[in-house]
Amino acid sequence: MRNTASSDGLTALAVAGTNVVLLGWDMPASQILAENVLGFSIGRRRSSDEEVRWMTGMKTFESVEPNPAAGVPVSSHKHPFQTFQWADYSVSPGETYSYRIVARRAPAFALTNGPEVTLTVTTEAVNVGEHAIFFNRGAVASQEYARRFQNQRPDVVGQAAFDWLSRGLLEGLESFIEAAGAGSELFGAFFEFKNDRVFKALKAAKARGAHIEILYDGDSQSEKNEEALEGSGIKSLTKPRERSGNYAHNKFLVLRHNGASVAVWTGSTNLSQNGIFGHSNNAHVVRDGGIADAYVAYWNILNADKTRKPTATAVGALGAVPPPSLSNGTLTVFSPRLNLDALDWYAQMAGGAQRGLFMTFAFGMNERFAKVYDREDDVLRFALMEKKGNGAQFRQQAAEIDRVRKHRNVTISVGNRVALNNFDRWLEEIDRITDEQHVLFVHTKYMLVDPLGTTPVVVVGSANFSAASTDTNDENMLVIRGNEAVADVYLGEFMRLFSHYAFRESLRFKGSTTPAAALRRKHLAETSAWIDGESASSNYFGAGTDRSLRRLYFSGQ
């Protein structure tokens, strides 16, 4: 859901997903300077219980609070946000919230109110509608985790830590399985299939009379999957996929009732400890019989367990990619394919973005997308990456990413954690929940093309945007066009993790661990010159700067 408001020169936009509300606002620079605005305070009212509180941040005015406690948030009413973009990550699905954005005038020790606007939005529900979207916390490397759980691994903390990290994702899958009973069928395909809670849910569904067949990767993950299945009580319901081109990399489950397909659960989440609780992942439920039927047809191809070429030939017969025309709605794309038509299509859509492009990359950036990002214009291009490259060409790929990210309209964030030094006031963060890990931070695979437009495009699923994920691996993707609610959820979640890791990466930049740099992070500017930034390239009103483009885009202009 989106809502806009404007009053006395202050313009704002609220974008509500399921667990995130994204806020952007704008005010003329001349007005900020004339009224000596030191920032913006944000108050929130929750309709369900009328709770009212001021949102919090981490920076303080030195004259008001020179030595803030490590890791302790401060009220934006006293220490306003010196930015034009902010997000609330503490909302719940299906709730109504009102946000009051107030310009706060100098002096810092006695702030007064300037122009203000109020925006009311209702977050998206997950239990109704065609689409339900779940994101895990995806941020074990966070100040909030360190505060809540003393930075101990969840297996030491207990269930509370697992619940916080899951953020409804695992619970959503359990609910999906609980819908199966007598007369139901569940057909699934998973790369990593080794979660006890999922096993128990499937076993219970079998006891209720559901017919269940699960394929799992029987090549690279064979030994670990089979070890996990021992003693689970559901091994007879499973079968290894042993002849994939490289990885049987799917993660999906189809639900059918009385011979009719009902819904599919898909996304990037491997059913492992790290997949569900460690690094960032998503799940996407589509409650549409036609889409679910397409997954059943694909599952039948996988179940035949043929090698890459006959599998790719059969997959290609399911539908042309790209389609002759793309109308609003949901389209499926399956792999392996005989060529890279799907990847070329994704790159074409990415290159056609008019205002904004947002993509996640778990294992480097394919050259097709590197060319799209290597453009300096007025299109905002964001990328969230696990790492800058992969394999033997890592240094070359990383150098290319560092070159491209210098474009004024390109912003790239790479997964990281806070590394303490003698000057910071940040709490120490862990970066993994188990010793066995391949990905630490970013594992999602999705692309958003003009998400705030009237015909946004969301591409999401199990496939990395790579050649191997297109013509070799078993993969599935959804292409969703024209659904603003879906785009709103994904944009909020993207910016949540993008901002999270961009900040952590910034702490490692050259000069960031000096005493002066640490103090800049700690304290707010006490004049309206904060809008100038620390350089011409970081000026909020500089022509074509990243901050200027973001200010306009996220305020709905």
Image (spheres, grey):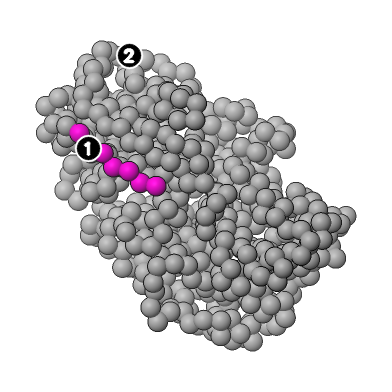
Q: Give above or below for 392 relative to 518.
A: below
Q: Position of residue 473 (x, y in %)?
A: 60, 73
Q: Nearer the viewer, residue 537 or 547?
A: 547
Residue drawn at 26 percent across, 39 percent down: 5
Residue 49, position as x, y percentages in the image:
50, 26
Q: Which residue is mark 1?
A: 6
**Residue occupying image coordinates x 66% and y 42%:** 433
Residue drawn at (31%, 68%) of the image: 352
Rendered image quadrant of residue 165 = top right
Query: Which residue occupies the foreground of this view, 272 or 5?
Result: 5
Q: Are marks 1 and 2 in contact (CB under 8 Å)?
A: no
The amino acid on which the numbered mark 2 sits, given as a three-letter code, is Val
Where are the magenta residues, as a range? 1-7
Does the magenta run of residues contain 319? no
Q: Secondary structure at mark 1?
A: strand
| Percent x, y of residue 55 | 40, 27
Residue 394 in view: no
Q: Label 2: state its secondary structure.
A: loop
Tell whether 125 sits left or right of 269. Answer: left
Q: Is residue 331 visible?
A: yes
In the picture of the structure, the residue carrying the numbered disc 2 is 64
Q: Is residue 248 left or right of residue 324?
A: right
**Sequence order check, earlier mark of 1 and 2:** 1
Q: Is residue 46 above or below residue 168?
A: above
Q: Residues within 10 Å of mark 2 (few under 14, many from 20)?
A: some
Residue type highlighted by circle 1: Ser
Q: Position of residue 470 (x, y in %)?
A: 53, 74
Residue 2 shown in magenta? yes
Give residue 555's quadrant in the image: top left
Figure label count: 2
